[in-house]
Image: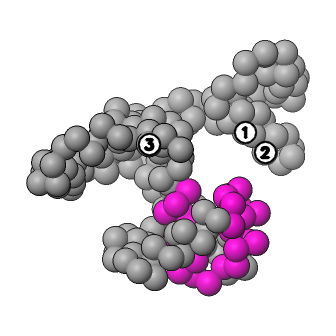
């Protein structure tokens, strides 16, 4: 199996450590929203998703959820869960330091993080989340006929972007509350 990151091995251990510490220094010296922007610039959406999933798996394992519950909640394989559990048992200091600062998962429901923390972030940094906030406001202020039109337009779109899916979710939530 070819190593995707084989060029990193051309760097000596000291240089690799210096580069890692540079990243840590850049992230630790800035506020959350700036850190989010920096990470968005440094890693792809797929890499961010993979890292976030690992963190959530570690969080769920630390809270005692089963492999099946974790697999069902965030669609990761048992092998991935086992690797993260082994990492937690062997090292895991970083995970254990970060997990208490994150939202709690409701007992018995690995799907739900405490959303009050997420809502607080959205309130504190509205400019960062303005597209989502704007979509929620448009849907909330739309009448039934306008919502149906929005749903039809979304249905006819060929490319389903994350924004399209998010709007469909917002429309679905608001139509059920009518």
Whether residues under marks 2 and 1 lie with C-beta atoms below 8 angstroms apart, the answer is yes
Q: Residue at x 15, y 49 (%)?
A: 12
Q: Secondary structure at mark 1?
A: helix
Magenta segment range?
53-78
Residue nearest the viewer, comparing 148 with 14: 14
The 10 Å Cα crowd at callout 3, few under 14, some 14 to 19, many 20 or more, is few
Is residue 140 visible to us here?
no
Is residue 86 visible to us here?
yes
Q: Secondary structure at mark 2?
A: helix
Report which residue position mark 1 lands on: 170
Whether residues under marks 2 and 3 lie with C-beta atoms below 8 angstroms apart, the answer is no
Indicate which disc, 2 or 3, sits on the residue closer to the N terminus: 3
Q: Is residue 40 found inside the magenta-colored segment of the image?
A: no
Report which residue position mark 2 lands on: 173
Indicate which disc, 3 or 1, sits on the residue closer to the N terminus: 3
Report which residue position mark 3 lands on: 3
Identify whether 4 is placed above or below 69: above
Q: Is residue 61 found inside the magenta-colored segment of the image?
A: yes
Q: Residue furthest front?
A: 1
| Foreground label between 3 and 1 | 3
Q: Residue at x 66, y 79 (%)?
A: 65
Q: Label 2 to label 3, Cα distance in Å?
A: 44 Å
| Foreground label between 2 and 3 | 3
Residue 169 image position (x, y, % from top left): 75, 40
Q: Quadrant of the C terminus?
A: top right
Quarter of the view holding residue 99: bottom left
Quarter of the view holding residue 126: top left
């Amino acid at each position: 199996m070819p190593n995707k990151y084989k060029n990193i091995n051309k760097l000596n251990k000291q240089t690799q450590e210096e580069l890692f510490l540079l990243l840590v220094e850049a992230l630790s010296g800035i506020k959350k929203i700036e850190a989010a922007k920096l990470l968005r610039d440094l890693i792809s959406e797929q890499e961010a998703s993979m890292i976030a999933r690992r963190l959530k798996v570690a969080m769920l394992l630390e809270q005692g959820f089963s492999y099946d519950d974790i697999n069902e909640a965030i669609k990761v394989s048992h092998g991935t869960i086992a690797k993260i559990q082994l990492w937690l048992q062997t090292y895991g200091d970083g995970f254990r330091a970060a997990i208490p600062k994150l939202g709690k998962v409701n007992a018995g429901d690995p799907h739900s993080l405490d959303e009050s923390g997420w809502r607080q972030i959205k309130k504190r940094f509205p400019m960062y989340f303005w597209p989502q906030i704007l979509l929620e406001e448009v849907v909330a202020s739309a009448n039934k006929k306008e919502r149906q039109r929005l749903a039809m337009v979304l249905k006819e779109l060929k490319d389903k972007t994350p924004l399209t899916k998010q709007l469909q979710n917002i429309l679905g939530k608001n139509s059920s509350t009518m």
